[in-house]
Image (tube, rainbow, N blue to C red):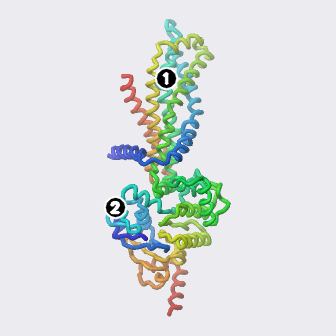
């Protein structure tokens, strides 16, 4: 019952976010600020993780392809498929749920605890629109981050394959080009748009409706990370079934 | 002027406000006092429109709040200024940004016009060299003054203050009280202050209402509070030995 109530409250919150917009001149500034915080600020960790995940996937694939009849190009093929279909959109989103999600929950939660949200409401400002809408717009740029993650992940795989002596560069690149279906990239980018919406709204929900003091801000951030991850995993399953099934 | 007519507010089984009626006059500092848990904050939040009363009405210059449309409510809120207990300044903005915020949101003034207005109100609250500082870089008393400046920057008709001098030293607390009273009289604002600071009651309490367990137990002025025989009020206001002696001296002097 408690969960159903929370889900209902979440959708009411989403509805409120799009009502009574803040002045565009102000909103524009807020959106650019959020792009800087949520996307540009997360690029370092996305690139770092993607590079090494791509490398690890390649090494593990290479170590499991022990049959001499299997061509080395399969290493590139497997790395591409894993990175594009799952690691870049989903794995990166889980990392983002931790980094960006906890930032969103703690910043909005602190505003709640220190009555800054009440101050906005008293002024007659739609606080949900003011605080959450720019985050949603900013995270809509997340597919660009995922595209970069795909590129860096595959680059990491190539580096691991070539410099680790698992496959020659030519074979790896041939594997990357083998049976390439551009729809897989589309599928990954569609997923990342939905994940971006989840990453912006679920942590905002936990921050906005939190009660208590400073300690509860920390608790809300943890809860928000857990629920954002759970929602991403469930949505990932549903979207995969719908788009690839 | 704000008129409150028999308002009730409950949270689940907890009946917090039990039929409060009163009137807050224009140009006066109206104080709400009472022990913790007496319903002061809930009452103030009802006046601000943050909580909707379950029963009863609140009239702002004769307009019944519950009968206003959403747009009219928003417009009315722009006529309200609020000083929160913890100041509630926006951490990421400078002092100037905080004070300019309502002007940015609700006016189409040019930057120089807004700048002039911000300079004026900051000067009015005796803060002239803190424009570019962040809230975390200034003292509690200065934060309160910034909060007052932000509350009055839009020329409000109503000013609400929740414990405006809590956490301040006695001298700064009196300065803040006096500043609120001066502003109230100067701009003819209806000011409502939620406090349990007895210095404020004695200094600026032009009208005081005392809440107890969600009821209005007593109302009067800071002069009348000396003379009242209401036991709940005297127990609360004169809880310290010092205040008891002050009251005794006052009564003896009058006799």
* Residue A84 disc label: 1
Identify the secondary structure beneath mark 1: helix
- Return the residue nearer the eye: B116 or A84: B116
Q: In the displayed structure, would residue A131 be above or below residue B70?
A: above
A98 above or below A23? above
Taking depth in this image into account, of A243 and B16 the one nearest to the observer is A243
Q: From the viewer's perspective, is residue A95 above or below residue B187?
A: above
Of residues A132 and B198, the one nearer the viewer is A132
Q: Secondary structure at mark 2?
A: helix
Residue beneath disc 2? B67
- Label 2 crowd (10 A; few <14 / some 14-19 / many >=20): few
In percent of width and height, residue B188 lies at: 51, 71
Residue placed at 45% from the left, 24% from the top? A186
Relative side of A131 to B120, left or right: left
Name of the residue lying farthest toward the right: B129
Residue B197 in the figure: left or right of residue B43 = right
Residue at position x 55%, y 44% in the image: A29
Relative image position of residue B148 (x, y in whole percent): 56, 64
Of all chains, the one bearing label 1 is: A
Q: Nearer the viewer, mark 2 or mark 1?
A: 2
């Amino acid at each position: 019952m408690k969960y159903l109530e929370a889900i209902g409250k979440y959708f009411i919150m989403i509805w409120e976010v799009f009502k009574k917009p803040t002045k565009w001149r102000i909103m524009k500034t807020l959106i650019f600020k959020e792009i800087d915080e949520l996307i540009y600020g997360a690029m370092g960790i996305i690139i770092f993780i993607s590079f090494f995940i791509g490398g690890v996937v390649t090494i593990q694939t290479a170590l499991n392809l022990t049959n001499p009849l299997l061509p080395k190009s399969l290493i590139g093929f497997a790395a591409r498929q894993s990175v594009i279909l799952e690691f870049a959109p989903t794995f990166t989103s889980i990392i983002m749920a931790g980094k960006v999600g906890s930032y969103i929950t703690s910043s909005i939660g602190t505003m709640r605890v220190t009555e800054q949200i009440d101050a906005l409401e008293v002024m007659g400002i739609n606080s949900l629109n003011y605080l959450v809408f720019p985050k949603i717009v900013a995270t809509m740029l997340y597919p660009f981050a995922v595209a970069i993650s795909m590129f860096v992940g595959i680059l990491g795989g190539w580096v691991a394959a070539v410099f680790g002596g698992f496959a020659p560069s030519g074979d790896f690149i041939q594997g990357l080009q083998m049976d390439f279906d551009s729809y897989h990239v589309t599928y990954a980018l569609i997923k990342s748009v939905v994940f971006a919406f989840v990453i912006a709204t679920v942590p905002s929900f936990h921050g906005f409706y939190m009660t208590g003091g400073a300690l509860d801000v920390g608790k809300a951030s943890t809860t928000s990370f857990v629920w954002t991850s759970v929602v991403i995993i469930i949505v990932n399953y549903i979207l995969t079934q719908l788009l690839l099934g | 002027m704000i008129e409150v007519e028999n308002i009730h507010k409950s949270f689940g089984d907890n009946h917090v406000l039990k039929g409060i009626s009163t009137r807050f006059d224009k140009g006066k500092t109206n104080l709400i006092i009472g022990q913790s848990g007496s319903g002061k904050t809930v009452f103030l939040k009802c006046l601000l429109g943050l909580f909707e009363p379950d029963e009863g009405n609140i009239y702002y210059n004769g307009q019944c709040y519950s009968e206003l449309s959403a747009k009219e409510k928003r417009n009315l809120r722009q006529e309200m200024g609020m000083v929160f207990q913890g100041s509630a300044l926006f951490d990421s903005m400078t002092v100037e940004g905080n004070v300019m915020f309502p002007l940015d949101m609700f006016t189409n003034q040019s930057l120089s016009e807004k700048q002039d207005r911000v300079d004026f109100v900051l000067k009015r609250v005796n803060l002239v060299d803190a424009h570019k500082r962040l809230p975390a870089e200034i003292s509690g008393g200065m934060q309160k003054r910034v909060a007052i400046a932000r509350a009055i920057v839009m020329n409000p008709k109503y000013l609400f203050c929740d414990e405006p001098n809590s956490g301040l030293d006695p001298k700064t607390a009196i300065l803040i009280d006096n500043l609120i009273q001066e502003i109230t009289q100067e701009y003819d604002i209806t000011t409502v202050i939620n406090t349990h600071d007895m210095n404020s009651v004695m200094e600026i309490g032009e009208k005081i209402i005392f809440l107890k367990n969600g009821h209005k137990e007593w109302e009067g002025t800071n002069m009348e509070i000396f003379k009242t025989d209401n036991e709940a009020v005297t127990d609360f206001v004169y809880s310290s030995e010092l205040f008891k002696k002050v009251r005794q001296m006052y009564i003896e002097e009058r006799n």
